[in-house]
Image (cartoon, grey):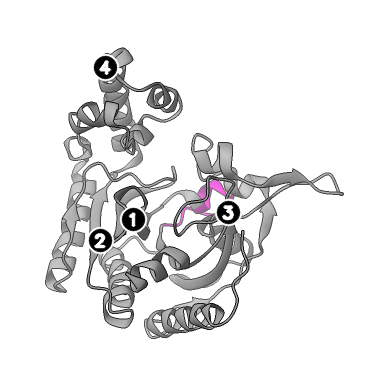
Amino acid sequence: MRDILAPESGRWRRFTAVFAEVVEAAGYEHVIPPLMEDLGVFTRIGEATDVVTKEMYDFVDKGERHVALRPEQTASVCRAFVQHRPTTPWKAWYAGPNFRYEKPQRGRYRQFDQVGVEVLGADDPYLDVEVIALGWKFLTERLFLRQVELKLNSLGEPDDRARYTDALRAHFEAAGDDLSEQSRITLAKNPLRVLDSKRRADAAIVAAAPTIDRFWSDAAAAHFAIVRTGLDSLGIPYALDQKLVRGLDYYRRTTFEFAGGTLDSAQNALGGGGRYDGLVESLGGPPTPGIGFALGVDRTLLACDD
C-alpha cells in the first residue's frame, strides 16, 4: 500500500471526474458501497478463485461477524441492489479502493483503486455493446490512449461453460506431468484458470486446448453475434480471444478486456468485465441479469504516461 501525494493526487481526482462525465452522460448514477462486507457477499464470486481463496483480507470482528475488505465492487453493487431494489434497468458507476493480498506488481498494489459501471435488470445484447463502448470512449477519446486493444469472448450459458470446463479438464489431465506443477494445482480447482498460465512449460499445451466456441448453445451464439455486430457498427475494433475467461467465476456470455499495448504482456490489463447474469440471484435477490466493467486507475495512468 502507499501514499499518493500532490501533484499525483490531483491527477487521480481528475481521472475520476472525467470518467464520471463520460458515464453520467449515458445515464449512470453514482453508488458508494462500503469498504467492508459480510464475507458471504464475496464468496459468491467463486470459491475456486484465487481472489476468494488466497487474496481477500478477511477477519472476525468484535461482534463475531466474519467480514472482508472488498476485493472488487461488482458483488457489493449487486448486494446493494438486493437490499434497496432500485428501479431497473439500474445503471450505476463507482470509484474507490479495493484490497487484495497478492504480490505487488507494476500498476497493482494491495490497495488499488478502480472506476467502473454496472447495469442490472436487462439482458439485451445491445446493452453489452453500450457498456463496452463507454469503456472504449473513456480510454481512447477522453484519455487519448492510442495503444489499447479490446479483447472479446463469450463464455456461453452455464451449461455451455460446464461442458467446456469438462473438456479442458480432460485435455490438461491428458498432458500429465508435461503440465507445470502450479498449473496442475490450478487444474484441480478450476480448469479455466489454467488458460491464464504464462509459464513457458505450459505454452504449447494451452495453445492446443479446445476453444469455448465449440460449446456455445444457439442462444449464446446469437447473443454474441449481436454484440459483435453492434461493435462493428460503432467502428470499435476488437480481437476475438477464445481463451479470455477473466478472473472471477460469475461471468457468463460476453466477457472482455482492455489491454495496454505499452505494458508488459503479463500485466497489461487496464481493466475489463462482462455479463454476470445469476450473481444477484446467488445473493438472495430475484433473477436479474447484469453486466459491467472496472478499470484500474494505477495501471491506466501508467499507460497514459507511456
How far apart are the alpha carbons under marks 4 and 3? 35 Å
For disc 3, the marked residue is: 110
The residue drawn where x is 43% and y is 70% is 89
Say few, some or many: other residues with alpha carbon within 10 Å of mark 2 (under 14 / 14 to 19 / 20 or more): some
Q: In x, y percent, where is residue 64?
A: 83, 44
Within the image, what quadrant is residue 227 found in?
A: bottom left
Q: Are marks 1 and 2 in contact (CB under 8 Å)?
A: yes
In the rendered structure, find residue 261 and report the number of the disc placed on it: 2
The magenta segment: 280-289
Vertical placement of 165 versus 265: above or below? above
* Residues at marks 1 and 3 touching, judged by CB atoms closer than 8 Å: no
**In which quadrant is the C terminus drawn?**
bottom left
Is residue 231 toward the left or the right of residue 180 in the image? Answer: left
| Mark 3 nearby-residue class (10 Å; few <14, some 14–19, many ≥20) | some
Tell me, for residue 175, which label it has, or none: 4
Q: Of residues 183 and 190, which is closer to you in this image? A: 183
Query: Could you tell me if residue 120 is visible in this image?
Result: no
In the shown orientation, is residue 203 left or right of residue 46? left
Q: Sequence-wise, which precedes: disc 1 or disc 4?
A: 4
Q: Amino acid at mark 3?
A: Arg
Q: Residue at x 45, y 49 (%)?
A: 278
| Element assignment for label 4 | helix
The answer to which of marks 2 and 3 sits earlier in the sequence is 3
